[in-house]
Image: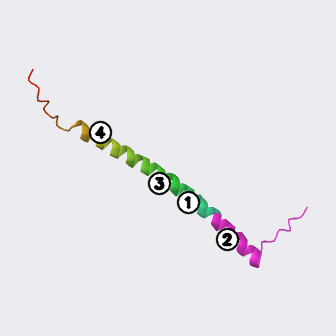
Amino acid sequence: MSNDFTPPHGDAAWNAAKKEVAKRNEAAYARAREQRAAREAADRARRAAAERREWANLPQQPDGRDD
């Protein structure tokens, strides 16, 4: 069995290159979406913790009752 593979030429080569670029772009977009989701989750957790600390440190109102 001989190996008679010839690389594509003309439009076929251009379409193959275009598909390869599209595949790499989609992979890059997927990685970016995952990284952004992780970053946003960490930011939300950080803000929630800061808000809990803020609420925990608020001064208490006097209740006005004399015991």
* Mark 1 residue element: helix
Between discs 4 and 3, the one toward the N terminus: 3
- Residue pointed to by mark 2: 18
Foreground pick, 4 / 16:
16
- Residue pointed to by mark 3: 36
Q: Which residues are magenta?
A: 1-22
Residue beneath the point at 51% across and 57% down: 32
Q: CA distance from mark 1 to mark 4?
A: 34 Å
Between discs 2 and 3, the one toward the N terminus: 2
- Residue pointed to by mark 1: 29
Q: Is residue 62 left or right of residue 9?
A: left
Q: Looking at the image, is 25 positioned above or below residue 57?
A: below
Q: For residue 47, which numbered disc appears in the image?
A: none
Q: Amino acid at mark 3?
A: Arg
Between discs 4 and 2, the one toward the N terminus: 2
Residues marked 3 and 1 touching at CB (< 8 Å): no
Label 4: how many residues lie within 10 Å, few (<14), some (14-19) or many (20+)? few
Residue 14's spot in the image, x, y percent?
71, 75
Label 3: how many residues lie within 10 Å, few (<14), some (14-19) or many (20+)? few
Is label 2 or label 3 in front?
3
